[in-house]
Image (spheres, rainbow, N blue to C red):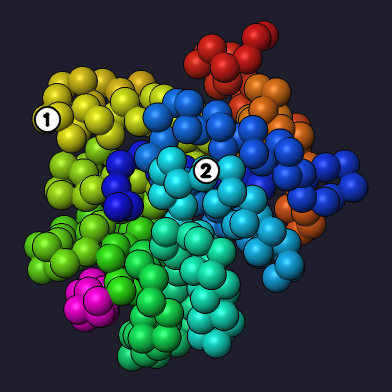
Amino acid sequence: MFTGSMVAIITPFDRDGRFDEETFRKLIEFQIENGTDVIVPCGTTGESATLDHAEHKRVIKSCIEQVNKRIPVLAGTGSNATSEAIELSQDAKTMGADGVLLISPYYNKPSQEGVYRHFKAIAENVAIPQVLYNVPGRTGMNMTADTTIRLATQPNVVGIKEASGDLTQVSQIIAEAGEKINVISGDDFLTLPMMACGGKGVISVTANIMPGEVKALVTAVNENRYHDARKMHLDLLELHQSMFVETNPVPVKIAASLMGLCGDHLRLPLVELQPDNLAKLKKVLVRYGLTQA
């Protein structure tokens, strides 16, 4: 269910900092029209850390309504408090999400046993497909391959979004648990090498602004057209890198704004791009034909 080109969709805000539902629904249509396979609301790219619980539910509900079962919705419901993650996941299930994306506990820095018990508790308490999310750069700790492989035996755990940047770790998970769970790239610039190892797709930041191209790359790999996939991978590399010239999702939201897809409004502590980085981003967007000089 959760394979292919998946977008970690941005959450647009209006000038007063409120959730811009009308624009959000248009962004979803833009994704579906361009072949995106799964919509992932309320992830890191969706600024979930600054959404209160009511807003979190509203974003997910709006996404489910707009998608209207045309493609799966994988709702971000992770937390560093196990009880809160269970509550958010149950809410997403009740609203009709097809699955939930669960970041590993951040800030607490639990042991691997603590990480295991956290995800096991969610899997045992919420009967919905669950994709785990390992992103050490955000959480301050790495969920090891052994822990992921151990969790793959849980019936509700169907995948892992791997953003450790460690292809050896990814390969170990695929080698030992690839028949039980889908391994998904959490880094756009590692989509090709991870899929070459047996990964099943990407949860993409770049797809917010170039969904068709990200889908084309994933399709090329799935069709074993590796010459084409390699060319697409290299062609997209500069754009992928520009999406992280500062902390995600600042660059991609600014890029989407410059393309006329949404406003550029962020919530503190995130702020606008620094002038030199904004200039770099604008040049990249022009080179890719996404904006005019």
Q: Main secondary structure of the magenta part?
A: helix
**Quadrant location of the C terminus?**
top right
Res 118 quadrant in image: bottom left
- 199 falls in the magenta region: no
Residue 176 vs residue 76, the one in the foreground: 76
Q: Which residue does the image show at 84% across and 50% down from the upper left? A: 17
Residue identified by numbered label 2: 67
Query: Which residues make up the magenta segment?
Result: 145-155
Q: Indicate the amino acid at tag 2.
A: Val
The numbered disc on residue 224 is 1
Res 214 quadrant in image: top left
Q: Indicate the amino acid at tag 1.
A: Asn
Q: x and y percent of residue 21 in the render?
A: 73, 44
- 149 falls in the magenta region: yes
| Dot 2: element | helix
Q: x and y percent of residue 101 in the render?
A: 44, 63
**Closer to us: mark 2 or mark 1?**
2
